[in-house]
Image (cartoon, coloured by chain):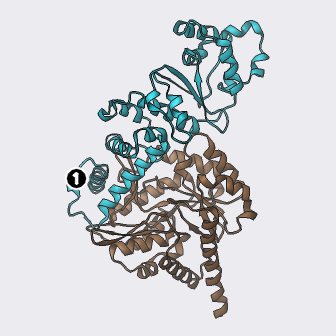
Amino acid sequence: MSDAVQALQDIQRRFARWVLGQDDGAGLAGLVEGPGLWVHRNTVRLTLSDALGDLYPVTRQVVGDDFFAQAARLFLRDQPPVAATLLLWGGRFPAFLEELPPAQGLPYLPDLARLEWRRHQALHGPEAPVLTAGDLAALPVDQADGLALTLHPTAGLVVSDWPVLDLWQAHQGPDDFDRLRFSPRRQDIVIVRPQAQVLLQALPPGGARFLACLDQGIGPAIARAVEEEPGFNAGALLAQALSAGWFRRDAAVQKEQV
Amino acid sequence: MTLHFSGNGETSGLPRRAGIGLKPEHYADILQAGPQGLPNVGWFEAHPENYMGEGGPPHRWLTAICGHWPLSLHAVGLSLGSAGGVDPAHLARLKALTDRYQPAMVSDHLAWSQVDGLYLNDLLPVPLTAVARDVFAANIDRVQTVLQRPILIENPSLYLRWAGAEMTETSLLRDLVRRTGCGLLLDVNNVAVSCGNLGDDPEAYLRAFPLDAVQEIHLAGHAVRQVEGQTLRLDDHGSPVRPEVWALYTLTLRLLRDRGLPPPPTLIEWDTEIPTLSCWQQEAAEADRLLAAVWDEERADV
């Protein structure tokens, strides 16, 4: 890079630090004329804060618009987008909320945000054919234990100490959610988009572990789930998963044949 | 370097009439109406950055809509003014979209938005210097080489001027056309916004614009606000086209016509406070009416 191009890049760096709120713009003094510095700073802040709010609509409802806007501004300053499509930005917001001092009074907030990020990922994830119960029925029964199943590529799992899916669902209609009755209770959740719609489904305890381990084979997955939850019922969950389309089709293989 | 494009990179171009932006809130209504139900919409324009997920509803809708209307992909993220060059990952994502949807047109802005990998989500101004121009031309070359097609560059809406200008914006755009073979997207609303904010004469700007290279026109609404005693035109694309912009559009059409150029494909943009489809269509109908009227005047003059 020539010195002249380097100098252009230096100006662009100074501009970026200013619009992201990382400094006071003193480095731009004398370089620009016109009212525009503030316009660009406001545009960057508002459009990115709005984009984050669109990504985390229930998180925003729970904390309120003002709190969310302040959290978004800090997040933007510390972790601005690194790709020119905002579809890829914002995945670290749940971890950011975990560390954000003013959010410490809402211990369920990071997991609620994780659920929303997983939903976003499922919405824009890759298309893939879905495994049906009929596909499995065609296999010999004695091979069932060794059968490995792969979750659909849009699928994500969230395990929370709080029933964050209940919280999310309570905010899909009119806001009549009773926060006083909201109390810690473990919830396993699968988020997946087999077709056009994203499905969000609460699982029985041990269900997330079971689904996550199915690529090792059904037998080992049951064993891992039972470690976590002695009364775990694999048959009911497997039937539900197959009818709802949580697995990808071309990945159904006989483990022992691999 | 002037690139010569041929083979499957050849574009059919957009219909020489009005189009509108494609927004998710209208997907279902658009497909239900079909081309017969939307007589004033000749084509749609979409931001490719909103279709850069691997799958999902946006692709399903866009695929269906491309089956009925020509598509223009109007990028906001190439950051062609970046001293550090164009992000190869972003360019690859755009290439995947142009391969998949074969749009009639691809465009981006005379602007930058990325430095050191950070993306600022705003169209930031390019200094009017030889260095910035050369960087810009090299970045256009790279994009056109990868996409194997020419792109259009849009004049920006400006709120500030860099000190030390060595040329005018119109002469910089003229250089880009000559050196890269790109075309131009003339945003008439941006002319009103920039000239209003910087104290320039919009008619003089239009007369100096390299009109021979214009392959598409944009129209949109903008807001007028008082900020610290100054009148500021904010390019928010959130309202109908203002009367003064319709007047500049009419002037632009006459200038094009008088040079023997054909009617330009014209987009009505709307990005905030999205209107109903029928309200948006009325704006497109007005653009269509002016396109027809200006070239009819010529026949009347003969």
B144 lies above or below A191: below
Helix, strand or loop status at disc 1: loop
Residue B98: percent from left, percent from top = 60, 51
Q: Chain of mark 1?
A: A
Image mark count: 1
- Please give the name of the residue rendered at 64% of the width and 78% of the height, measured from the top-left corner: B289
* The chain coloured cyan in the image: A
Residues A169 and B119: in front is A169
Residue A126: percent from left, percent from top = 60, 35
Quadrant of image for the C terminus of chain A: top right
* Left or right relative to B236: residue B286: right
Can the viewer see residue A103 in this picture?
Answer: yes
| Residue under numbered circle 1 | A24
Disc 1 marks a residue whose amino acid type is Asp
B181 lies above or below A161: below
Residues B112 and B31: in front is B31
- Please give the name of the residue rendered at 32% of the width and 40% of the height, measured from the top-left corner: A78
Residues B54 and B207: in front is B54
Most extreme residue toward the bottom is B302
* Left or right relative to B90: residue A11: left
Quadrant of residue A194 within the rendered picture: top right
For chain B, give the colour.
brown
- 10 Å crowding of disc 1: few (<14), some (14-19), many (20+): few
Residue A193: percent from left, percent from top = 62, 33
* Left or right relative to A253: residue A69: left
Can the viewer see residue A89 in this picture?
Answer: no
B52 lies above or below B123: above
- Please give the name of the residue rendered at 30% of the width and 60% of the height, measured from the top-left corner: A38
Residue B254: percent from left, percent from top = 55, 83
